[in-house]
Image (cartoon, rainbow, N blue to C red):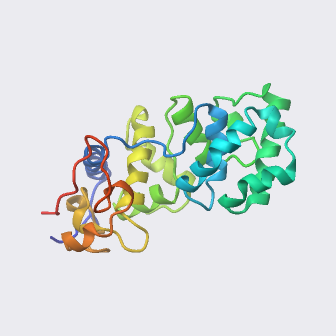
Amino acid sequence: MKPIDVSAESDLARTRRARKMFRALREQFPHAHCELDFRTPLELLVATILSAQTTDVGVNKVTPTLFARYPDAAAYAAADREELEELLRPTGFYRAKAKSVMTLGQALVERFDGQVPPRLEDLVTLPGVGRKTAFVVLGDAFGLPGLTVDTHFGRVVRRAGWTDLEDPVKVEHAIGEMFPRKEWTQLSHVLIFEGRRICHAKRPACGVCPIARWCPSYGAGETDPDKARKLLKFELAPGAERPEGVPEPAAVL
């Protein structure tokens, strides 16, 4: 199989192809979700801030103790700096992260009565909160549509030929125009799952990718199905326990 040529593709054709790829990814990842463990908007906001420069798995190892010790914004605002830093040490950049969550707690107490606001305009005014973090919280804690343009999202949409833009805000707007607003949060989840598990930065597993037939970047990674399957990450890795309802990646035809 050869990569498709999209050099003369119209905007309408690109949108139709993108939606077709989204449907295939939803079938591959019907369980796609936010992989940070949380129970409240505050817990998700803090966990997302802590996820910078580390993995969600690593953050999830720290947050049970963290959330028990600091149950609300006031607790973060009044935290002992050294104690908080020690709790956050495994996540990396723990001094900066401790400062971020402490100032976040202070801002929430002073400006929002200790509650996480459910509006983008308010969230992005909080310390350590950008559009990406805000959309994670809006989509997964409040059920409000948003596109989370992280490194995985950006890499997949560029390889898929949906856009060639690099700036996350421009990518957000360009991709948002291609899909109904109600699909934005789930679109983010499946693209991030695809990026983490199959379309890796250095060596994508093209040979078992569910959207390879529509991808202009097919061949950028391993195309042999058996070799590609060995590159799969997380629950798609060979021998890993598969969640109920998740299909085994098939060889690309």
**What's the residue at 74%, 39% (across, down)?**
69
- In the displayed structure, 162 sits above or below 43; it is below
**Quadrant hosting residue 237:** bottom left
Q: Work out which residue is located at the far left of the displayed protein and give it.
A: 253
Residue 168 rendering spot, x and y as whole percentages: 55, 55
Quadrant location, the C terminus: bottom left
Q: What is the total number of numbered labels drawn onto the structure image?
A: 0
Residue 222 rendering spot, x and y as whole percentages: 27, 74
Q: In this view, does 125 lie to the left or right of 209?
A: right
Q: Toward the viewer: 76 or 223?
A: 76
Residue 26 rendering spot, x and y as whole percentages: 30, 43
**Quadrant hosting residue 209:** bottom left
**What's the residue at 59%, 37% (across, down)?**
137
Residue 193 rendering spot, x and y as whole percentages: 40, 52
**What's the residue at 85%, 43% (across, down)?**
79
Quadrant location, the N terminus: bottom left
Q: Is residue 156 left or right of residue 92?
A: left
